[in-house]
Image: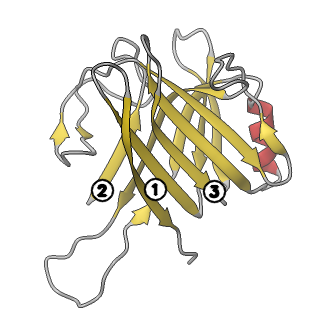
Amino acid sequence: MAATVRGGRAASVPLPGCRPGMAITDPIAGSQTGEVEMSKKDMFLKLESKRGGAVKGESEDPAHPAEMVVLDFSWGMTSVVSTGFSGKETKPAQLELRITKNVDTASTGLMSVMKTNDEIKKAVLTVRKAGGKQEDYFSIVIQGGRITSLEVSSEGDHPLLTERLSLTFNKIEVQYKAQSATGAMKGASTFQDEVTPG
């Protein structure tokens, strides 16, 4: 049993690792759907390591200066559900936060963080709707983790190189803010969890 949250570019742009018609899990309804029309969104990643400090990207957005521009991400939880009764509660396992971005000025800094096994002091993934009144409505904040994988690749005819990261963490906070038809932000709902070593 798994709950997965995914973000991505507009449906007209192919997403790395996605196949046409591939089933995805709706994180709200918990049901599987087929190919969906993804609305365009802006996504940013801000990352600070314990020893190396802030890893600066190329974003020129006034609200997210020098952050990394994110193309796609995924994160979720998974647990084993038994039909029997064992009397023992099983805590869901946290999946890694996976990020897809273009190679940019942050890339070599991220490589250094991984090479030195530097701890992620804090990383913030922010999502907002594109166009009109742009407000951050979804965020994932992680602390105390590591970069466990980093891959640079060429995506067919895509003119830029693509970079994929996997981040572990000890603490996570997920926040969602509803937005009214006028663009005003409503109250926030928050999920928090800590990963127990071992």
Q: Are marks 3 and 1 in contact (CB under 8 Å)?
A: no
Q: Is residue 69 above or below residue 23?
A: above
Q: Is residue 155 above or below residue 175?
A: above
Q: Where does residue 25 sit, x and y in percent of width and height?
A: 25, 43
Which image quarter is the C terminus in? bottom right
Q: Amino acid at mark 3?
A: Gln
Q: What residue does disc 3 label?
A: 143
Which image quarter is the N terminus in? bottom left
Dot 3, crowdedness within 10 Å: few (<14), some or many (≥20)? many
Residue at horizontal 66 percent and vertical 19 percent from the top:
62
Left or right, residue 71 beside residue 87: right
Number of numbered markers? 3
Q: Are marks 1 and 2 in contact (CB under 8 Å)?
A: yes
- Give the CA separation, mark 1 to mark 2: 10 Å
Nearest the viewer among 47 and 97 is: 47
Q: Amino acid at mark 1?
A: Leu
Query: Residue extending furthest left?
Result: 83
Q: Quadrant of residue 90?
A: bottom left
Left or right, residue 84 beside residue 144: left
Q: Earlier in the sequence, mark 3 or mark 2?
A: 2
Q: What residue does disc 2 label?
A: 2
In the picture, the disc for residue 95 is 1
